[in-house]
Image (cartoon, grey):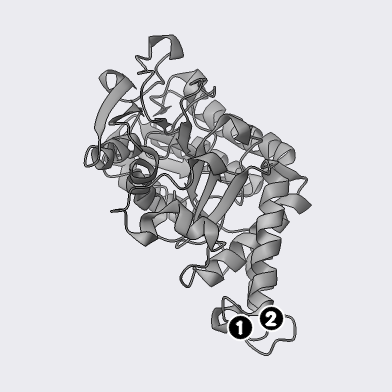
């Protein structure tokens, strides 16, 4: 069976070249006589894999020297707790921006540890937009400001980086990391689950300014303390070695494509094709305000929801898979991360046109 176009929000497609190389190295990584899955994380072979992966990520994102890069477990959801546990210090409150389901989950977790000031929200609009920065009610005494640049479920994406002054800006970039250039220096912490643009599920990337490390209280468990992992180069315990290895190959693949500038050009073009198709037919609709539409996650509905099952069935026959929208919003969702080839979007667009014509 040929490979399908997998529009899943995560775990998502990986570059075919990465999967092929991993399969070639499955039993024997570069003459070591064993798979990466079998290697000691403290052995010379894996240490070289880990070092190259970090170096390539630093190069891709132009990460300043005063930032640590951590390769952790627990998903982005564990970061919802680690952030307040490590950053509150002697403060008692933090600012959060609510733009969708992942923002809400981060807020709910933070409320276990501090007073949460929801400084801005788009809930009244059904999370179809991003609050204008001028409307934010930020607390100058907050320990940090947290936001989600791209809401995977709702397909809402910030088109600006908020300026929070001396208050550290924290971003859940699970759906946007590596999709374009980002000025890392504007953030205190960037964190991201790997299973969208970085690699397989099981790995979480944390990019943290060094001054924010070492502020956790004595009651914070070692595994939830950034200092634990920073001081041990992410090897305090056995890290997700195979996911780390695959992420490293993805970093190398992105570099070979021309880096983040080149990726951004392709990603913007893919998204434009899909949104143009949606907007050009009254058969489909996207609820998000145009200036805040996501490049990565494109939700859309059919004019007649009774046709949803037929749409998914016929799309599946063409190798267009996992297009069903999140259960909380319904409809369809096409996630078009870096590894989704432009041909996949072209095939989807043509199918959408054909389906609309046949069912109008």
Q: Position of residue 321 (x, y in %)?
A: 46, 54
Q: Position of residue 146 (x, y in %)?
A: 40, 32
- The 10 Å Cα crowd at callout 2, few under 14, some 14 to 19, many 20 or more, is some
Would you say 225 lies left or right of 240 here?
A: left
Residue farthest bottom in this picture: 33
Q: Quadrant of the N terminus?
A: bottom right
- Residue found 28% across the figure and 39% down from its top: 110
Query: 313 or 338: which is nearer to us?
Result: 338
Residue 29 — which label? 2
- Residue found 51% across the figure and 41% down from its top: 190
Q: Position of residue 159 (x, y in %)?
A: 54, 23
- Residue found 37% across the figure and 17% down from its top: 138
Q: Can residue 318 be seen here?
A: no
User: Mark 1–mark 2 contact, CB under 8 Å?
Assistant: yes
Task: Count the marks.
Answer: 2
Q: Can residue 243 be seen here?
A: yes
Q: Secondary structure at mark 2?
A: loop
Looking at the rendering, which quadrant does residue 305 occupy?
A: top left
Would you say 159 lies left or right of 328 here?
A: right
Q: Secondary structure at mark 1?
A: loop
Give the mark nearer the N terminus: 1 vs 2. Answer: 2
The residue beneath circle 1 is 35
Q: Quadrant of the C terminus?
A: top left
Would you say 271 lies left or right of 328 here?
A: right
Looking at the rendering, which quadrant does residue 154 occupy?
A: top left
């Amino acid at each position: 069976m040929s490979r399908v176009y997998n529009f899943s929000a995560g775990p998502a497609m990986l570059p075919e070249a990465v999967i092929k190389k991993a399969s070639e190295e499955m039993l024997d990584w570069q003459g070591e006589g064993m798979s990466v899955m079998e290697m000691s994380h403290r052995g010379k072979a894996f240490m070289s894999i880990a070092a190259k992966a970090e170096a390539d990520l630093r190069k891709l994102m132009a990460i300043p020297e005063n930032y640590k890069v951590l390769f952790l477990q627990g998903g982005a959801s564990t970061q919802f707790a680690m952030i307040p546990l490590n950053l509150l210090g002697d403060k008692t409150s933090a600012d959060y921006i609510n733009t969708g389901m992942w923002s809400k989950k981060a807020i709910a977790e933070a409320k276990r540890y501090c007073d949460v000031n929801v400084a801005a929200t788009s809930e009244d609009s059904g999370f179809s937009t991003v609050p204008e920065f001028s409307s934010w009610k930020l607390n100058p005494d907050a320990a940090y400001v947290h936001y989600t640049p791209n809401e995977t479920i709702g397909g809402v994406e910030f088109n600006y980086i908020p300026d929070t002054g001396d208050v550290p800006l924290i971003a859940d970039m699970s759906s946007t990391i590596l999709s374009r250039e980002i000025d890392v220096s504007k953030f205190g912490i960037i964190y991201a689950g790997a299973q969208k643009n970085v690699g397989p599920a099981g790995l979480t990337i944390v990019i943290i300014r060094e001054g924010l490390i070492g502020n956790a209280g004595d009651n914070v468990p070692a595994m939830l303390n950034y200092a634990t992992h920073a001081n041990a180069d992410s090897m305090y315990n056995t890290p997700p070695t195979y996911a780390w290895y695959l992420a490293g190959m993805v970093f190398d693949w992105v570099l070979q494509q021309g880096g983040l500038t080149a990726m951004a050009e392709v990603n913007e073009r893919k998204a434009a094709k899909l949104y143009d198709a949606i907007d050009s037919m009254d058969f489909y609709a996207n609820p998000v305000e145009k200036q805040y539409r996501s490049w990565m996650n494109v939700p859309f509905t059919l004019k007649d929801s009774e046709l949803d099952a037929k749409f998914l069935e016929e799309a599946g026959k063409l190798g267009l898979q996992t297009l069903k929208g999140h259960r909380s919003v319904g409809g369809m969702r096409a996630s078009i991360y870096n590894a989704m080839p432009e041909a996949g979007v072209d095939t989807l667009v043509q199918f959408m046109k054909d389906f609309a014509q046949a069912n109008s």
